[in-house]
Amino acid sequence: MKRRDFIKASAIGAIGVNLLPLSLHQSNRLKAQTTAPDVVWVENGEPEALFKSAMKELGGINKFISKGDVVVIKPNIGWAKTPEFAATTNPDLVAEIVKQCKEAGAKEVKVFDHTCNPWQRCYNLSGIEEKAGASGAKLTQTYDHKYTNLAINGQHIKEWPIYKDYLEADKVINVPIAKHHGLDRVTLGLKNLMGVMGGRRGSLHNNFGNKMADINSKLIPTLTIIDAYRILTANGPTGGNLSDVKLTKTLIASSCTVSADYVALDLFGHKLHQIQHISIANERGLNKFDLTKLNVKKVKLA
């Protein structure tokens, strides 16, 4: 089934469970790897090497991207900041993802974001326009006429305008940067998908966790790749002070956004119950894997 048909059918079968916190620094919590892991944590490398290692552990890019696919890569390009401020996704990572998708036979790779600052400055200063474009991606701004109302039928959101290119893509790779956020402590994969939403996004900040769960039930990516090469530890999401940036040289990858976000909390020392939108997403059954039994593979590059 094509991803766009899956969205239309609203076929979600995961069951939510209550969770205990995960600490990636406790080796007894990491299971022996007999199959592809649910989540991969790779550290101590440059963005390209981190992504290559993660894909190797997950079974290769061809497991997710097929010949002829139209692929959307959704990074965070929301702010007019250069990469060292950790407000936007690392451009070298985005470029490597584009490259591998093209090598896997993707027909077209689109990269875009509904930016908060003027889009031209965001695309330029982030470095994503230059580097992703050089790898073969098609980068455009988001156009008002390309949003279409999607039936959500959630507890709090009944419908919302979503960008058509996202909905019509064969495959979607969600590539957030891990950073602090004043609303609910962190912004990771679930919140990054606000960048494909139109409408009055500010209204989502009231009862944020439940509304994020509603909308994310329909916005299911093929892969979530969390950029933690640099993380923003305070004054997010815009940043602007290099003292708030921590160089961690890490990447977290999973076919389940909730699982990736959950594991990424360890970057900040947070527990699940502290992060409302991720906790509610799990309680609502948006998790593909049982988070109490996650098969996590941790890799440290030489």
Image (tube, grey):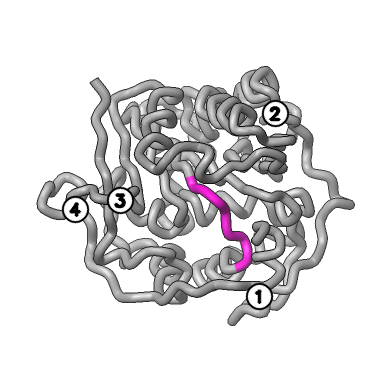
Amino acid at the residue labelled 3: Thr
Which residue occupies the extreme right position in the image? 145
* CA separation in Å, label 3 and label 4: 11 Å
Kindly tell me whether residue 244 is visible in this rendering. Answer: no
In the displayed structure, 220 sits above or below 233; it is below
* CA separation in Å, label 3 and label 1: 37 Å
In the displayed structure, 187 sits above or below 102; it is below
Q: Secondary structure at mark 4?
A: loop
Residue 58 location, quadrant? top left
In the displayed structure, 30 sits above or below 287; it is above
Residue that numbered label 3 is attached to = 35
* CA separation in Å, label 3 and label 2: 32 Å
Give left or right: position of 31 versus 225. Answer: left
Residue that numbered label 4 is attached to = 31
Magenta range: 218-224
Residue 189 picture location, percent across and down: 49, 51
Residue that numbered label 2 is attached to = 137
Amino acid at the residue labelled 1: Ile
Mark nearest the camera among 4 and 2 is: 4
Q: Secondary structure at mark 2?
A: loop
Residue 288 location, quadrant? bottom left
Q: Residue at x 71, y 69 (%)?
A: 8
Label located before the other in sequence (1 or 2): 2
Residue that numbered label 1 is attached to = 157
Mark nearest the camera among 3 and 2 is: 3
Label located before the other in sequence (3 or 1): 3
* CA separation in Å, label 1 and label 2: 33 Å
Residue 105 picture location, percent across and down: 65, 33
Q: Residues within 10 Å of mark 2 (few under 14, many from 20)?
A: many
